[in-house]
Amino acid sequence: MSTKKKSKKIYFTITGMNHFHGQAFLKPGMKVQLEKEPKNPFDKEAILVSIEGLGPIAHVANSAHTVKGDSYSAGRMYDCFKKRAVGKVKFVLDYGAICVLK
């Protein structure tokens, strides 16, 4: 019997893609890079979402109006990693996507 505890998966919503490149290219399984943006003038807990080769594509949702389902908001997941992290797209929605922190 294993004594290793299974860690809880952290899901998060990415939003605001219309401010970058749109979301037509986004597919489940894509890897996304997360980077904290403490100097963001609109949100001190902002987390920028980028894709290698394309650059910034979105932000992690941080509003009750944009966080979907049981996803973590940017503020809730801000202390789950240091400066950068990697996530994976799980579901593409009409306005954003649900991802999981790797």
Image (cartoon, helix red, strand yellow):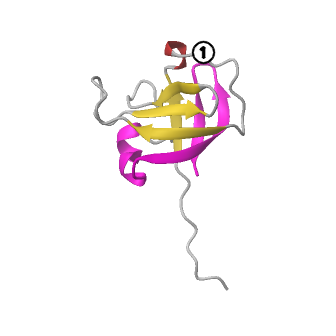
Is 72 situated left or right of 100 in this image?
A: left
As rendered, which of 9 and 34 lies closer to the eye?
A: 34
**Percent x, y of residue 72:** 45, 42
As rendered, which of 75 and 37 lies closer to the eye?
A: 37
Who's the residue at 38% across and 28% down the image? 63
Q: Residue furthest bottom?
A: 1
Residue 87 visible within the image: yes
Q: Secondary structure at mark 1?
A: loop
Q: Is residue 89 magenta?
A: yes
Is 70 situated left or right of 93 in this image?
A: left
Mark 1 — residue?
22
Q: Is residue 8 magenta?
A: no
Residue 68 visible within the image: no
**Percent x, y of residue 5:** 55, 73
The answer to which quarter of the image holds residue 62 is top left
**Percent x, y of residue 4:** 58, 77
**Percent x, y of residue 27:** 72, 30
Who's the residue at 60% across and 30% down the image? 97
Who's the residue at 36% across and 51% down the image? 79
Determine crowd level at label 1: few under 14, some 14-19, many 20+ residues with C-alpha closer than 10 A. Answer: some
Relative to 85, say whether 56 is above or below.
above
| Number of numbered tags placed on the structure image | 1
The answer to which quarter of the image holds residue 17 is top right
Image quarter in which the N terminus is found: bottom right
Who's the residue at 58% across and 44% down the image? 87
The amino acid marked with disc number 1 is Gly
Q: Which residues are magenta?
A: 73-102
